[in-house]
Image (cartoon, grey):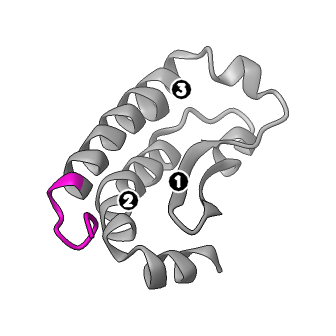
Amino acid sequence: PMIDILEAVAPAYTRAVDRELVPVAKQARAAWPVDTGLSRSLIFLSYESRDDRQYAAKLGSAAPYVWYIQKSAAARRLIFAPGTAAAFKIADRLFSDPEFRR
């Protein structure tokens, strides 16, 4: 899995994402307003490698009606605002981690 690759090549990045973004994803799923439960079940946190020096973590929704979800107060409160704050914290952690700066 991608997380194993990231842990091998970018442990500082993986630690930062685990510490900052994973809790945001868990909280979004736990607090998501439920009607049918489908949109909550489609909230995801994924990892991708663009090349050997670029990695990304994505927090989002795979719902086919994501356009409407992203405009909702729940999405702003549970995904966008805390996800953006987590991204800044991840960057701060990485810039202060000597292992990452090598």
**Residue depicted at x 27% and y 70%:** 102
Q: Is 23 above or below relative to 12?
A: above
Quarter of the figure that contains the N terminus: bottom right
Q: Mark 1 sits on what residue?
A: 57
Q: Secondary structure at mark 3?
A: helix
Distance of mark 3 from mark 1, alpha carbons?
17 Å
User: Dot 3 corresponds to which residue?
Assistant: 75
The residue mark sitting in front, 3 or 1, is: 1
The dot on residue 17 is: 2
Name the residue at the front extreme: 102
Specify few, some or many for label 3: CA neighbours under 10 Å numbering under 14, 14-19, or 20 or more.
many
The crowd level at tag 1 (other Cα within 10 Å; few <14, some 14-19, many 20+) is some
**Left or right, residue 6 beside residue 77:** right
Q: Residue at x 67, y 23 (%)?
A: 69
Q: Earlier in the sequence, mark 3 or mark 2?
A: 2
State which region is magenta: 95-102
Residue visible at 57% across and 69% down in the picture: 52
* Residue in front for this viewpoint, 71 or 9: 9
